[in-house]
Image (cartoon, coloured by chain):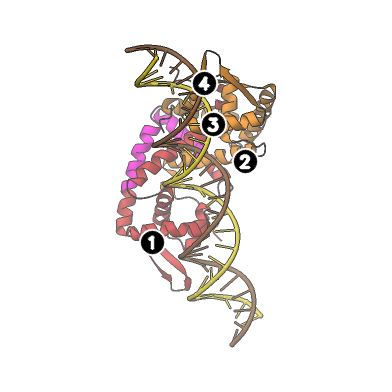
Chain colours: A red, B orange, C brown, D yellow
DNA sequence: GTCTATCGTAGGGTGCGACCAATCATTGGA
DNA sequence: TCCAATGATTGGTCGCACCCTACGATAGAC
């Protein structure tokens, strides 16, 4: 049984492919971890954004991640339902919503961050600490360079 | 207009997330490139596998990539339709199909490999040649370690 | 005060990847 | 010779990312 057949060298030579494949590993694990708590990847991203800096509108929040504002509606709605976020109309512009973390949201974010760190540890297990640092540095630079929603 | 808002540091600290995000970059670009030629990511992967070593059955091929055999049917079917692959029943076991690249398939694979290399160049543009080597090495090791279909 | 633009929202459509059950031909062993 | 297992296939579901349109409420410019 050759179940341990290696991937073709020619395939492994394509960085975009390997990146996509390893990326799916990370995505799946993160998604699984979050699903246990009733959250999606976008939910987590938005939580960190709310913690980082309160957005002046949902539209700005959507732009930050390059997602469609109409898709953000569900994300924010879920966070509100779970009591992790709260919002009020901007008094200065009543079209906008000011969204912010609740104490429960901040606590949940802390928990999620811890679990994410544990997840990273298993994901990057085959690498030495130094190598992990190098990897995250390289990935951050790639992300920053290609950043916005530039597909 | 703060369209250039950075992603939250807490989010960038999660390797699994960054990996997923950068991975999507690679995936999208590869998929776009392949779509121009009527192919999917799996099609490309299978082409490289056929070139690397002829599988003894479609099931083995599916196992190599950890995908469902029923999903491989469409992939193989498309390659057959495009004349990139051919197959015949295994005389030793007529339940199995022996799939192989056609000359056209090999030529197409060469073309695709070239385009993939060009794509990699733009994707990894912000990195030095040495850094690119390091990155692919680290990614390969991650993939090898977690490999099978271990999600 | 009217007109245009913006914000949040509802609703719908697409494509892809993963997954599952059932079917038919074929095989190898009991 | 019959039976259980295997290979390829069909057909269907689910979830997710992405994208677009339309609409009511509000704001700002004129």
* The quadrant where residue A46 appears: bottom left
Question: Which mark identifies residue B57?
Answer: 4
Q: Between B18 and B36, which is closer to the camera in this rendering?
A: B36
Q: Which residue is mark 3?
A: B73
Calculate the distance from the C-alpha at mark 4 to the C-alpha at mark 3. Answer: 12 Å
The answer for which chain carries disc 4 is B
Q: Nearer the viewer, mark 1 or mark 4?
A: 4
Please indicate whether residue A87 sits to the left or right of residue C25 in the image.
Answer: left
Q: Which image quarter is the N terminus of chain B in? A: bottom right
Residue shown at 43% from the left, 74% from the top:
A91
Residue shown at 63% from the left, 28% from the top:
B80
Above or below: residue B142 compared with residue A82:
above
Q: Are marks 4 and 2 on the same chain?
A: yes
Above or below: residue D4 compared with residue A109:
above
Q: Residues within 10 Å of mark 4 (few under 14, many from 20)?
A: some
Q: Nearer the viewer, mark 1 or mark 2?
A: 2
Mark 4 or 3, nearer chain start: 4
The answer for which chain carries disc 1 is A
Please indicate whether residue A73 sits to the left or right of residue B108 in the image.
Answer: left
The answer for which chain carries disc 3 is B
Do the residues bearing badges 1 and 2 touch, measured as CB atoms within 8 Å?
no
Residue B98, percent from left and from top? 56, 19
The answer for which chain carries disc 2 is B
Q: Between A66 and B43, which is closer to the camera in this rendering?
A: B43
Disc 2 secondary structure class: helix
Q: Nearer the viewer, mark 4 or mark 2?
A: 4
Looking at the image, can residue A10 be seen? no
Q: Which residue is mark 2?
A: B32
Disc 4 secondary structure class: loop
Residue A134, percent from left and from top? 47, 33
Query: Over which residues does the magenta segment extend?
Result: A111-140
């Amino acid at each position: 049984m050759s179940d341990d057949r290696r991937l073709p060298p020619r395939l492994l030579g394509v960085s975009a492919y390997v990146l996509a494949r390893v990326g799916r590993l990370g995505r799946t694990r993160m998604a699984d971890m979050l699903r246990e708590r009733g959250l999606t990847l976008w939910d987590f991203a938005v939580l960190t954004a709310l913690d980082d800096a309160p957005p002046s509108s949902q539209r700005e929040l959507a732009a930050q991640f390059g997602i469609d504002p109409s898709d953000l509606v569900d994300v924010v709605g879920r966070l509100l339902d779970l009591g992790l976020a709260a919002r009020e109309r901007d008094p200065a512009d009543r079209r906008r919503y000011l969204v912010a973390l609740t104490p429960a949201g901040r606590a949940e974010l802390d928990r999620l961050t811890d679990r994410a760190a544990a997840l990273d540890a298993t994901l990057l297990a085959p690498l030495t600490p130094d190598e992990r640092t190098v990897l995250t540095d390289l990935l951050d630079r790639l992300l920053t360079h290609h950043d916005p929603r530039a597909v």
